[in-house]
Image: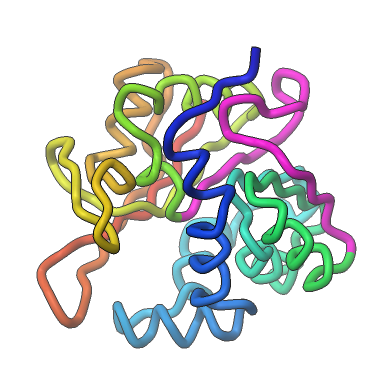
Amino acid sequence: MEKHTKQMEQWSGEFGRLYTDRNPQTFEEMDVFYLREFGVSRSTLNAEFLGDLDRSIRILEVGANVGAQLLGLQAMGFENLYGIELQAYAVEKAKANTRGVNLIQGSAFDIPYKDGYFDLVYTSGVLIHLSPEDIGAALDEIHRCTRAYIWGWEYYAPEYGSVPYRGNEELLWKTDFARLYMSRFPALRLVRERRVKYLANDNLDTMFLLRK
């Protein structure tokens, strides 16, 4: 039976729809947002972490929202792009925004692809919204369906902690997600990691690339 959580109810409903509408709709808007928040563009970070990879590899984004990040990878020359997204509204917007990208509705807890189907699976601001009690199931699915790489961009903290989010509890967490993966799957190797400070405060985000 597919997993169903309190957080999934929030993100698949009106709360998630409002999130989708207030966030960047295109990769160009995403670059502007990153420059404003971090002083470095998402394009620059993507090139730093994925620039050497073969453009024909098969890539899945878990939590693709409107497809902005997939468009950024497409602009880099990556050809075989897939996305899975919980929120039906965001899936429809993603399908309207993209061409040549395989997009489906679904959750991180039940990725409908066979073991090792992808060369790289990634999340961008998704693991932070999965509760510590449930996240292991999502990490298992991500690890299962990638043959080589796991890539991530998430909030960073040295220890697990909950953060209030728009007046709600139990919708946002910070931790060291790269180490969370490696503690669960000891054979994973850290290829690269970069922690990026916000310009307006001392909070950090982290980008990491792991290899099986």
* Magenta stretch bounds: 100-124
Above or below residue 88? Residue 203 is below
| Residue 102 location (% of width, % of height) | 84, 50
For residue 49, above or below residue 24: above
- x, y percent for residue 96: 83, 70
Residue 119 covered by magenta stretch: yes
State the residue in front, 49 or 173: 173
Observer-nearest of 135 and 81: 135
Q: What is the x, y in percent for residue 141?
A: 58, 23
Residue under the image location 52 percent in, 57 percent down: 16
Image quadrant of residue 24? bottom right
The front one of 201 and 20 is 20
Question: In front: 28, or 16?
Answer: 16
Q: In the rendered structure, does residue 148 fall within the stretch colored magenta?
A: no
| Residue 138 as seen in the image, left or right of residue 127 | right
- Considering only vertical position in the picture, is 162 above or below 54? above
Q: Which residue appears at 22% of the width and 73% of the height?
A: 198
- Residue drawn at 27 percent across, 57 percent down: 165
Question: Residue most toward the front?
Answer: 14
Q: Is residue 110 left or right of residue 81?
A: left
The furthest residue to the top: 1
* Vertical relation: 102 (above or below) 180: below
| Quadrant of image for the N terminus | top right
